[in-house]
Image: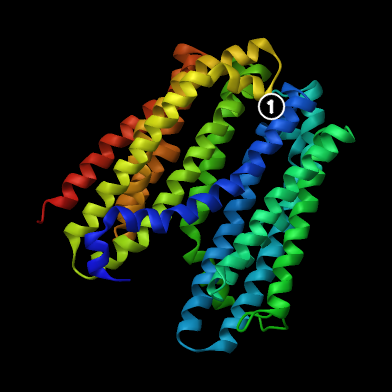
Amino acid sequence: MDLEKIRLHVGEMILRFSIPSIISMLMTSMITVADGFFIGNYVGKEGVAAVNLGLPVIYLFLAAGLMIAVGGAAIAGMAFGAGDKKMCGDVFCQTVAEALAAGIVMGILVSLCFTPMMKLLHADGLVRGYFREYYEILLFELPVMTLNSLLGMFIRQEGDPGYFMKVNVFHVVLNIALDAAFSEWFGWGVGGIAAASLLAALTALLCNLYFFEKKANVYRLRRFTFSGKVLRSTLLNGSSELIGELSLGIAMFAYNFVIMRRVGVDGVTAFTVVGYTSYLFNMILIGFGQGASPLVSFVYGAGQKKLARTIRKKTNLYVFFAGTVVILIMTLVSGQYGALFVKNEAVISMIRSGTRIFVLSFLFSGVNTITSFYFTAIGKAKESALISSSRGLVVLLICIFVLPALFGMTGVWLAAPVTESVTGLLTAYFIYIEKRPL
């Protein structure tokens, strides 16, 4: 990186680093949105609700997978930098084996929890049937998903991020094509959607394994000697990712629990559809965060603290502008947006009113997210963790349980804007404290 170039072209450098990441994140998120589109149009609102009720299961797999992948990749990367290729290979193979074993064990345990989970959420009839039909297949796909994510990290460390991006794009396009074929042409319902995800993920896995067989120079699958020390370091290094994803899973379970008890299936379906907007917008925020973070770390490490803050401020302006644009668009098309996913007029009405409240959170979520990335990039993990835990768990859970009790479904929509605005006060305080030494 060129310090002077960053100083003279801050905005351009942020966009240059962020846009590829944003595209990649949005492409990945399109799988979830496409699944929702086909389930809503070819199965019905009960199918959408059933899939949403199981999202904590997906977050559980992501939590364990990311913990192992990030932790193992960090150890292997340090060994790579030190020139110890044997240790690189051993850590890589052990990380893959750990991820596979964790996926199998979790799949067995989660399958035993299906019935208690449905009872706790008060789900019955079609919703319970669709839940089992979808997740009994998806339990085979989720370990493959975590393996693909893990292998992608090591492909990047091999210095070929373009290969993984191409595989990722192919994976998304194939998944959407199979969704259309299995749901529209063959009429296989939610089971077909789950099968499409499984087949697309397996195809992507074969492409990723091909890389390590034919193209990799350092990381190769082979026999290895298990190391307890490496396992401990892997789990420790990846613990923050575990906490982050588990927080999302807990929050989603709380949302589903409250909505099912107070509103029912229509409420969960509406919340799911409105939630797609948040999911896509969060991918944009993460893309900006991933783009700005290396710039912040570089200039901060060079002693240019004011420049690091300038990058944060400029990135915050970008995400605030993006949030404002999304709010305006979604407010104008909220009715038509709901009709894309469901045909039930009561649910569409709920989506229309809910969208206009829920998207107000985008005014604050961008600044909160980017500032959390900023504190991580300058080595202030405590501030970053407090911001993330506030908006992802502590304040959010309070809002989820209190606001719907006071305002019904309107309280559900208010939970996100209230959480982000309260977290915004915490974010502003940390920014103020961080500026004081200068």
> Would you identify the image quadrant in which residue 249 lies?
top right
Height in image: 229 above or below 84? above
Q: Which residue is mark 1?
A: 49
Task: Identify which residue is drawn at 29% across, 58% down.
Answer: 380
Check disc 1 and give the amino acid type: Ala
Say what secondary structure mark 1 lies in.
Answer: helix
- Count numbered badges in the picture: 1
Tell me where residue 389 appears, x and y as whole percent: 40, 43
Q: Residue at x 53, y 75 (%)?
A: 159
Q: Residue 80 appears at what percent x and percent y? A: 50, 82
Q: Does residue 424 appear anywhere in the picture?
A: yes
Is residue 412 visible in the rendered image? The answer is: no
Residue 304 quadrant: bottom left
User: Is 280 situated above or below 433?
Assistant: above
Quarter the N terminus occupies: bottom left
Residue occupying the point 20% across, 59% down: 307
Q: Residue furthest right?
A: 186
The quarter of the picture where residue 46 lies is top right
User: In screen coordinates, is 432 left or right of 386?
Assistant: left
- The location of residue 45, given as percent across then percent down, is 72, 22
Q: Where in the figure is residue 95, as x and y percent of width and height?
A: 62, 71
Mark 1 Cα-neighbour bin, 10 Å: few <14, some 14–19, many ≥20: many
Colouring: rainbow
Q: Is 25 left or right of 309, judged from the image as shown? A: right
Residue placed farthest to the left in the image? Answer: 438
